[in-house]
Amino acid sequence: MGNKLLTDGGKIFFDWKHLTPTYSGRLLGRVYDLAETPATGAHSALGIDPRHVSASMGHEAHHIWQSRSMGDAFIFNYAMQMINALTVGENPFQSANYFEAQAYGDVWNY
Amino acid sequence: MELLKLIKRVILCAAMFSCCDPKIDLLLNEDIRQKQIDFSCGTVAFAISTMRGHLFFFDQAYDLTNVVSIYHDSLQVKYKGDTIATTLYDEDGKEVKASPITLTGQRKTLTAFEIEQGAGRGDTITILTKGYIHCLSERVSIDTLNIIINRDF
């Protein structure tokens, strides 16, 4: 994905604080804009453009470290948190999802 | 509509194997999504959005015919009587600490700020822009921007 972004003019930079590459802009940026999501994080930080990725990094870095701490189990657990939130009528991307509550609460002070 | 947005995010989430955090556009001064200001050095368009009422993005898109100076340390964000710290990012996502900075041509910047406890329905965030943009040596007149939160996140 990183190579594809570079060839179509997307932006890449390396966040040394969290040791992760970030990708944004062009095709990926349009997909994120369409989905009304400024940035996401799990394996790396992705987003609409570098400004939104940088501004969201305090939040997304939580997801990156959640993912690193849990390995392959993270995505499954994240999905289960989404289902859990939906079953109680809550938004799956908000505080009923433990991983989002942790990131929005900035518990690791990023 | 909300369901459609949710489905889009779920699809993106599945596609990217990532965590999705929705960006919600907010209204400036209760009625407009984007405020455009024309002045003698060009135009600037302001828009604001949020991630769940915690993180706010104040987007600025400039189309300039002359050099302008941005005094971003003069920008003040007020919430419930407190002044909220802001961070300016340039087009490459780099944090800008110097103030003023000069811009020309088509440029984008973003001012981000965070309300730790989260803003909710009925809250107002005020952005005071006095002295924010100077065209040559003239201060550009920009009204105070009020963001009235009319929904829960």
Image (cartoon, coloured by chain):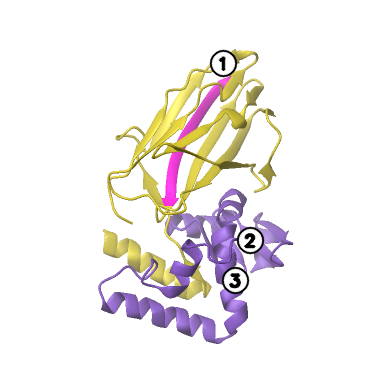
Is label 3 in a helix, a strand or a loop?
Answer: helix
| Residue in the foreground of this view, choosing between B38 and B110 | B110
| Overall secondary structure of the magenta section | strand
Three-letter residue code for mark 2: Tyr
Residue at 64%, 23% (x, y): give it. B68
Is label 2 in a helix, a strand or a loop?
Answer: strand
Q: Is residue B82 above or below residue A28?
A: above
User: What's drawn in magenta, residue-wise?
Assistant: B41-50
Task: Give the CA separation, mark 2 to mark 1.
Answer: 37 Å
Q: Which mark is residue A23?
A: 2
Q: Is the N terminus of chain A in the top left, top right, bottom left or bottom right quadrant? A: bottom right
Residue at 37%, 49% (x, y): give it. B119
Disc 1 chain ID: B
Q: Of all residues shown, which one is farthest toward the top?
A: B138
The answer to whether tags 3 and 2 share a subunit is: yes
Residue B113 visible in the shown view:
yes
Q: Which residue is mark 3?
A: A64
Kindly indicate whether the residue at mark 1 contacts the one at mark 3 (C-beta within 8 angstroms). no
User: Which comes before the other along the chain, label 3 or label 2?
Assistant: 2
The answer to whether tags 2 and 1 share a subunit is: no
Three-letter residue code for mark 1: Arg
Task: Indicate the colour of chain B.
Answer: yellow
Q: Which residue is mark 1?
A: B139
Q: Few, some or many C-alpha atoms within 10 Å of disc 2 (few <14, some 14-19, many ≥20)?
A: many
Asked whether residue B31 is drawn in magenta, I would say no
